Amino acid sequence: MVALALLTSCIKDEEANQECDIVSAWVEGKEYENYFYDVTQMKHENIASTVTEIVFTVKSMISLPEKLPIQLTVTPGATVVPASGSEQHFKDGPVTYTVTSQDGSWQRQYTVVFREAVKPTYRYGFEEVETIEGMNNNLYHNFYIFDQAGNRQNVWATGNPGAILIKQNSMPEDQPTYSTEQGYVGRGVCMNTQDAGMLGRLFGKPIAAGNLFIGQFILDNVLLDALKATQFGLPIDRVPIRVTGYYKYRPGDTFTNKDMEPVPGRVDEASIYAVFYRNVDKDNKPIFLYGDNVLSSEYIVRKAEVASLPPTDEWTPFEMFFEGGDADPIVLASQGYNMTLVFSSSKDGASFEGAIGSTLYVDEVVVSFEEITKQ
């Protein structure tokens, strides 16, 4: 019960009149559709309780109107300032919205941002990292990048926000995924498989593999449906063909199954793969991949996977090529595909099988793309 209380979106006693969340946000009106690559990008639904920044991606900031109205749905009885539907100057930068609970006791602040869909940087050196203070005085690392326009992009996610639920007063290096100063060049990323403790065993999740992926970690789903906690992929407007980088890996001593029973003769393996997939269905509804279908979804167009990652204590190059079908140029131009890149210290960590102590390092990752042909 303590763990479930930690996952609530505000400090509250589960009373509706104390909730203060933005549930959905959207731009309404056909006159605004041409500013977006796709109409599905005009609305954010079922906004997770951990989100405090709502980002709308547009074709161009230059042509964006001076003022735009954002429609908001908040939790029952709550109020929001500025008001839902009021026109705001988003060209001048982020706009802060304050949501107040019905009884006036609780508030949350959100920033709503419009950003231009510029080409992201596809060389990942993992130099940009911040330390976040989470629940129970736990610290963990969060990775991000700067795009070609100098804007911060939160493309990377880890399972750290879920792993700290079982800890107190821990440091970033105590988490499954953290930044290390001993990278191949500068800083790198270290992922290690850990014992999830009594709480993990209670919920049938005895280990926590270190991971890093392009997408979003949804904390609300950790205890309810752990495979839905990892939401893989972000929009992209080009076709990936190859991923290269450097790694080090050392498997843990004892491989265990989901019941924490040793599996004789089995040695843990690391995992590095990438997926390129269609991000809307035939009815134009958004599609995301999760831990239960990231390698099997019918919407996958291409996949890449490193076949083998032999144990090594030296920085060793890896390479993988995307295989699969072709992308529709029209759909591609409207960012109708997502790409994710995934690293894990235990290949079957999503099934809670692996070896405690398995450690994977990665650095200097480069994604190569097909040349864009001018029509």
Image (cartoon, rainbow, N blue to C red):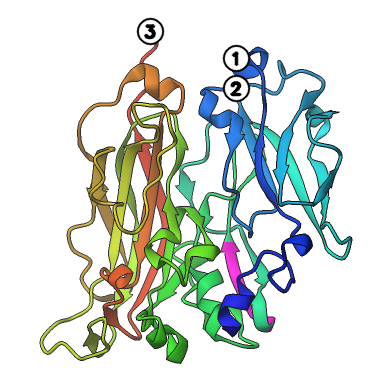
Camera sees residue 119: yes
Where residue 34 is drawn, which disc sits there? 1
Q: Nearer the viewer, mark 3 or mark 1?
A: 1
State which quadrant residue 350 falls in.
bottom left
Vertical position of residue 139 compared to residue 123: above or below: below
Image marks 3 and 1: residues in contact by CB distance under 8 Å: no
Name the spot of residue 15 as percent of width and height, x first.
Answer: 72, 67
Vertical position of residue 352 compared to residue 88: above or below: below
Name the spot of residue 67 as percent of width and height, x first.
Answer: 82, 22
Distance Cα–Cα, label 1 vs label 2:
8 Å
Question: Quick one: 279 or 203, which is closer to the camera?
Answer: 203
Distance Cα–Cα, label 3 vs label 1:
20 Å
Range of the magenta residues?
Answer: 137-142
Q: Earlier in the sequence, mark 3 or mark 1?
A: 1
Q: Residues within 10 Å of mark 3 (few under 14, many from 20)?
A: few
Where residue 375 is drawn, which disc sits there? 3
Where residue 215 is drawn, which disc sits there? none
